């Protein structure tokens, strides 16, 4: 009986160690170039969605399909750290929403990132 519990305990510990070693590998992307972010970007999967990044690390987002134009959109602040882009949105009703994006590809005209759900999106500068 004791041997059976000892064997079960050994198998359980071995299983835990096996799964603990199977973490998703961390990918390292080049650091975000904040200077390349400055300007207005449009989502390739939803061309009515716009994001404008200003030099003061502030900006605005709007969607023309919702009949919202530039100057009427949601204000945000942004920051970068390594390959991370953080957006802090401030809604008209006082809500505060964060987006944390991992920038996987960046050129002067293209920005691709993954969100916290590992979904990838691409934007082009207009």
Image (cartoon, helix red, strand yellow):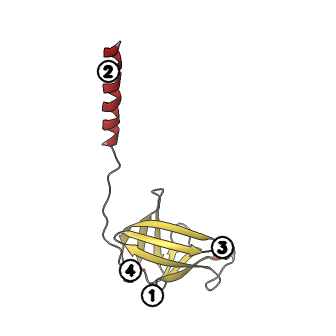
> Which of pointers 2 and 4 lies earlier in the amino acid sequence?
2
Q: Nearer the viewer, mark 2 or mark 4?
A: 2
Compared with 43, 56 (above or below) is: below
Point out which mark residue 65 bears. 3
- Residue picked out by circle 4: 34
State the SS at label 2: helix
Q: Nearer the viewer, mark 3 or mark 4?
A: 4
- Residue picked out by circle 2: 6
Q: Nearer the viewer, residue 103 or 110?
A: 103
Residue 108 on image: x %, y %: 38, 80
Compared with 66, 118 (above or below) is: above
Instruction: Compute the Cα span from label 3 to label 4.
Output: 28 Å
Point out which mark residue 55 bears. 1
> Which of pointers 2 and 3 lies earlier in the amino acid sequence?
2
Residue 94 on image: x %, y %: 65, 74
Residue 32 on image: x %, y %: 36, 74
């Amino acid at each position: 009986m004791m041997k059976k519990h000892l064997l079960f305990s050994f198998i359980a510990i071995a299983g835990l160690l096996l799964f603990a070693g199977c973490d998703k590998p961390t990918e390292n992307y080049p650091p975000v170039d904040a200077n390349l972010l400055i300007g207005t970007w449009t989502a390739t999967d939803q061309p009515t969605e716009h994001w404008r990044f200003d030099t003061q690390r502030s900006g605005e987002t709007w969607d023309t399909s919702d009949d919202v134009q530039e100057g009427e959109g949601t204000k945000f602040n942004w920051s970068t750290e390594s390959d991370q882009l953080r957006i802090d949105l401030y809604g008209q009703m006082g809500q505060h929403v964060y987006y944390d994006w991992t920038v996987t590809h960046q050129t002067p005209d293209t920005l691709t990132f993954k969100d916290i759900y590992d979904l990838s999106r691409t934007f082009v500068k207009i």
